[in-house]
Image (cartoon, grey):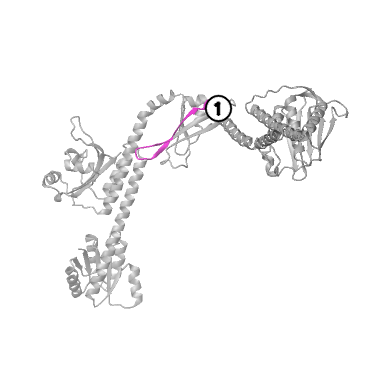
């Protein structure tokens, strides 16, 4: 049912309009002129006004302007009655603020349809306005609660904001509390009382329900998080008697839940109206209650933090671990004494972020990964390198809001050193295991041919011992000797590599005449390989910038066994991978501080892909074909050069030849 005001100087039209509108269930009042109509409108605040345009004195157009200019009447649905059909007149009416036009004579169905539509629109407009008012109040409450700490004037302002916007007589906040005997004794946390509804005395009366034992059924509902609301007349008789005696006509009680427990409640009391809340108002109030709950939770958390701060500091300061805390933005907020001692700085310097070796990972998903552990290497003020292991933990309050980070560090330098040694030992063991595996594979392959030759020659020699000629017998014996020599060289290479891997090779330098030594090595190789290749040996000595003596003896201190392994392997390889009659060159250059050996051949060359792996054990180049070999010779050369503290370089081109250059420091 709506309140409607009809303003028309035509009594007949008034009667028709009153009859139609009352039949629809509306409450209708009338006025016969514009001035009287404006007085009634200001007194009654109607939902709609039906006004004739043409009236003596204050006409309908002016009434429409005054209604729209009054803030209390601006949302009133206004229908202007007119006999005018001119478009210009209708424009004037719209400019004055009319919502609808109806032409005389009035069509009953059209009037009622337009009235229904207008009243619906007004109700929606009022609902939107109320909702905006409630939302604005909710925002104000949240801002006030965020700004206040504990009980202050802003806190009571937040309570008053809710009371005013919802038209309550009295609003107060209670905290759940019990006396020593276990009886409920609510603790008042804040209140607001509408001046017109409270007793006017020197001191306002306390909230009425505080003095009354809360009904058990209400307490059960609040503990379940349920809202209590309703008109007193609709409540059970036992509750009606208590509330009516207190002059309360309607109530609304909202539970305050903190840490999943009932902390208290907000109580709205209405003493002069039977107020009922719609669903949207309930949701707004739920949000307000949540803001109060969060406020109390924050206050409790801050209080707990303050109480535990002294205890926490006492414990933390006694720890040997480095302990620090960070704000959510990564700023250092606390360090213990161990932290300061370790880095050799004061607490003020640390909190000024002059030295922050660790900052939490602020970009990670802290809900999924609240704890992170990582290691960092730092350089202390004294220049020492140290390793620290940091345990970074995110700290939350009861509502899951991030308060900051705490990081604890331990010096793990010695552990890291032990780990590095273990890793090196494991790597060495892995290399030895791989070496053994490759050795077994190589031996099974490389020993097969010489063993087959020995067995074959021995069988032939046994079978033809009486009938074979002396020349044939010597050939069989020579074949056995060559195969045995090959196997002996193979075993010797393996033993040398094994001694190097086990670090059992001792460097024992003695004075050696390199020219004589080189000539001796060449003769041994040319004799043992039984090839037509010739090794050309050239030597030069540059002992200072003013002297060039080709016949000067080049001497120095070298390990003879290691030097023999270097030259014999390089020269043997040069012959093995060259044509049968190709020349091999060995150049010796003596300088003041070093000697240089250069072995050059015109053999098959080394593919570029094999060069990075040339000195690895058992590695053989992809173009060796059927040429036998173990892949250990160059490994032995590299180890022997390293034992002397020298260097080895290689230049090669497939099909052209290879040059190895060995540089050894000369110790006189």
**Position of the C terminus by quadrant:** top right
In front of the other: 531 or 432: 531
Magenta-span inclusion, residue 413: yes
Judge the density around disc 1: few (<14), some (14-19), many (≥20) Cα neighbours within 10 Å. Answer: few
Within the image, what quadrant is residue 535 found in? top right
Magenta-span inclusion, residue 111: no
Up-down relation of residue 82 to residue 668 (above or below): below
Residue that carries the numbered disc 1 in the rendered image = 417
Expressed as whole percent of the image width and height from the top left, the position of residue 493 reads 68, 31
Up-down relation of residue 524 to residue 97 (above or below): above
Instruction: Check disc 1 and report its element: helix, strand or loop.
Output: helix
Answer left or right for 416 relative to 666: left
Q: Tell me which residue sits at (86%, 29%) in the image.
A: 545
Expressed as whole percent of the image width and height from the top left, the position of residue 467 reads 74, 35
Within the image, what quadrant is residue 477 found in? top right
In front of the other: 394 or 192: 394
Total residue callouts: 1
> Would residue 59 be visible to someone looking at this image?
no
**Position of the N terminus by quadrant:** bottom left
- Magenta-tinted stretch: 393-417
In front of the other: 488 or 103: 488
């Amino acid at each position: 049912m709506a309140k409607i005001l009809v303003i028309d100087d035509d009594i007949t039209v008034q009667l028709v309009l009153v009859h139609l509108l009352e039949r629809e269930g509306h409450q209708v009042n009338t006025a016969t002129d514009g001035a009287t109509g404006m007085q009634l409108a200001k007194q009654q605040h109607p939902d709609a006004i039906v006004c004739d345009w043409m009236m003596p004195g204050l006409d309908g157009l002016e009434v429409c302007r005054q209604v729209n200019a009054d803030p209390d009447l601006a949302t009133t649905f206004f229908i202007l009655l007119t006999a005018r059909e001119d478009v210009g007149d209708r424009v004037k009416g719209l400019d004055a603020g009319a919502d609808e036009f109806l032409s005389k004579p009035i069509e009953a169905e059209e009037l009622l349809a337009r009235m229904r539509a207008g009243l619906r629109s007004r109700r929606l407009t009022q609902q939107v306005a109320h909702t905006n008012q409630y939302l604005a109040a909710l925002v104000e409450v949240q801002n006030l609660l965020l700004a206040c700490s504990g009980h202050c004037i802003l806190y009571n302002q937040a309570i008053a904001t809710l009371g005013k916007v919802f038209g309550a007589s009295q609003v107060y906040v209670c905290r759940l509390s019990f006396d020593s005997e276990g009886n409920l004794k609510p603790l008042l946390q804040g209140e607001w009382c509408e001046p017109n509804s409270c007793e006017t005395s020197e001191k306002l009366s306390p909230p009425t329900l505080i003095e009354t034992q809360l009904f058990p059924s209400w307490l059960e509902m609040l503990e379940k998080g349920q809202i209590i609301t309703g008109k007193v007349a609709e409540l059970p008789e036992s509750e009606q008697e208590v509330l009516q005696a207190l002059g309360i006509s309607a109530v609304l009680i909202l539970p305050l839940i903190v840490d999943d427990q009932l902390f208290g409640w907000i109580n709205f009391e209405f003493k002069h109206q039977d107020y009922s809340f719609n669903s949207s108002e309930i949701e707004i109030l739920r949000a307000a209650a949540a803001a109060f709950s969060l406020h109390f939770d924050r206050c409790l958390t801050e209080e707990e933090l303050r109480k535990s701060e002294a205890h926490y500091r006492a414990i933390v300061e006694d720890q040997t671990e480095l302990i620090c805390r960070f704000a959510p933005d990564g700023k250092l907020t606390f360090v213990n004494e161990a932290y300061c001692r370790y880095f050799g700085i004061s607490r003020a310097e640390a909190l000024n972020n002059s030295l922050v070796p660790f900052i939490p990972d602020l970009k990670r998903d802290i809900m999924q990964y609240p704890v992170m552990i990582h290691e960092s290497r730092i350089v202390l003020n004294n220049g020492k390198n140290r390793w620290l292991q940091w345990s970074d933990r995110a700290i939350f309050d009861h509502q899951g809001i991030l308060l900051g980070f705490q990081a604890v560090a331990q010096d793990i330098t010695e552990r890291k050193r032990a780990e590095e040694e273990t890793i090196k030992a494991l790597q060495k063991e892995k290399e030895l295991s791989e070496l053994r595996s490759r050795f077994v594979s190589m031996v099974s392959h490389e020993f097969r041919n010489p063993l087959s030759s020995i067995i074959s020659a021995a069988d032939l020699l046994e079978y033809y011992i009486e009938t074979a000629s002396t020349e044939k017998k010597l050939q069989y014996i020579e074949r056995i000797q060559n195969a045995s020599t090959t196997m002996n060289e193979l075993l010797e290479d393996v033993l040398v590599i094994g001694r190097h891997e086990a670090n059992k090779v001792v460097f024992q330098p003695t004075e050696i005449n390199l020219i004589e030594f080189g000539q001796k090595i060449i003769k041994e190789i040319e004799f043992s390989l039984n090839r037509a290749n010739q090794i050309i040996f050239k030597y030069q000595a540059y002992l200072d910038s003013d002297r060039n003596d080709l016949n000067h003896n080049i001497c120095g201190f070298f390990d003879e066994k290691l030097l023999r392994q270097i030259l014999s392997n390089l020269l043997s390889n040069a012959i093995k991978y060259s044509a049968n009659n190709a020349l091999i060159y060995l150049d010796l250059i003596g300088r003041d501080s070093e000697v240089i050996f250069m072995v050059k051949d015109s053999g098959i060359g080394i593919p570029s892909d094999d060069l990075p792996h040339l000195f690895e054990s058992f590695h053989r180049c992809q173009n060796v074909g059927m040429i036998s070999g173990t892949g250990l010779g160059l490994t032995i050369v590299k180890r022997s050069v390293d034992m002397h503290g020298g260097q080895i370089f290689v230049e090669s081109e497939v099909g052209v030849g290879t040059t190895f250059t060995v540089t050894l420091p000369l110790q006189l």
